[in-house]
Image (cartoon, grey):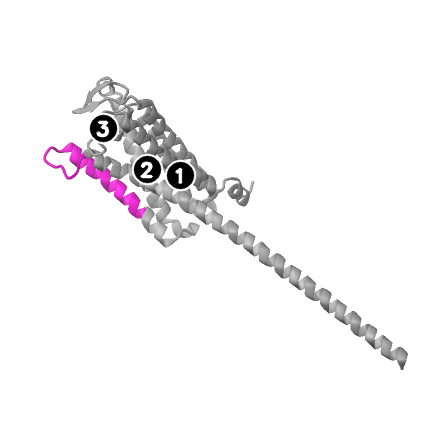
Amino acid sequence: MNRTARTRLFPPRLSAVLWIVAGLAWVVDEAITASAFPAYSYATNYISDLGIPQVGAFQGRAIDSPLHDVMNATFVGQGVLFAVAGVVAAIALRARGRRASRALGILAVAHGVGLTLVGVFHGSQVNADNGLLAFHSSGAFVAIVTANVAAIVVGSNGRAIGAAAAYRVVSVVLGILGLVSLVMLGVDSGSAAITVLPDGVWERGSVYTVVVWEVLTGVLVLVGAARRRAGRVAGSGAAAGAGMAAGTGAAAGTGAAAESDAATGSAKIEA
């Protein structure tokens, strides 16, 4: 199978749909899960608190998430959808930038693995006691870093795939903001003397940049595809109209020539 055939087999529109579904599902599922969590705070609670099955306390925060299965499924679902979307996009765009597309594919898969670990190994006191918390923490770190770096990679190489300048800038800015938020989360949570913003704000600053980027990217890809399709339809209509006009003109010219020949023949007969 040649490169063109692969591009047609894996259209970026599939990536767009998967990214949109993943991003919107994250926002909706998080809100639903948080609504069932008594006194849950988007500012002070971690997102991972929503996925803890046990009722109790962890790191000084009260934990009671009746819909923890919803959030854990969302963690895994986001990871899988992002990974598939990234790999599909990487294959489709390989002809336009082999190094960047390879990086996108690797980062997307790493993000998927990281979020799967987050959904399977909960950030709870139970896992802190049995030593499994490391899988949750490392998974979250990998997932956040790789997705934000993916946004930077796509933005930095956007010219090669025909992306608008504004989109390229927004992608890079979102990725940088996400990474800075993650660093600040580590600074604030690791020091009792420094509290610029609550931990929940910094964590969401590092995660929501990814959600915004994937939905934005998906919407722009679908809008661009729709405009190209409309342009092709309009072009086909114009070509068909021009062809009909040309055919009509040729027919008219043939008719006029026939009339002229008939008139000449009549003149010769009369003469």
Tag 2: amino acid: Thr
Q: As drawn, is 22 to the left or to the right of 267?
A: left
x 55%, y 43%: residue: 5
Residue 37 vs 144, above or below: the answer is above
Q: Considering depth in this image, is 45 or 169 the residue closer to the camera? A: 45
**What residue sits right under mark 1 in the picture?**
20
Crowding around mark 2 (Cα neighbors within 10 Å: few <14, some 14 to 19, many 20+) is: many
Q: Which stretch is magenta?
A: 172-198
x%, y% of residue 93? 45, 45
Q: Most extreme residue toward the left, as rendered? A: 193
Label 1 to label 2, Cα distance in Å?
Answer: 18 Å
Q: Is the magenta stretch mostly helix, strand or loop?
A: helix
Q: Select label 1 or label 2 by which is in front.
A: 1
SS for tag 2? helix
| Measured Cα–Cα span from mark 3 to mark 1 | 26 Å
Q: In screen coordinates, is 146 left or right of 233?
A: left
In this rendering, the answer to whether 49 lies above or below 221 is above
Which residue in the protein does label 2 denote? 146
- Percent from the top left, x then y, of residue 1? 56, 40
The image quadrant where one finds the C terminus is: bottom right
Residue under circle 3?
A: 40
Sequence-earlier tag: 3 or 1: 1
> At 39% across and 41% down in the image, what residue appears?
104
Q: Is mark 1 on a helix, strand or loop?
A: helix
The answer to whether residue 241 is magenta is: no
Q: Which of 57 and 10 is in front in this view?
A: 57
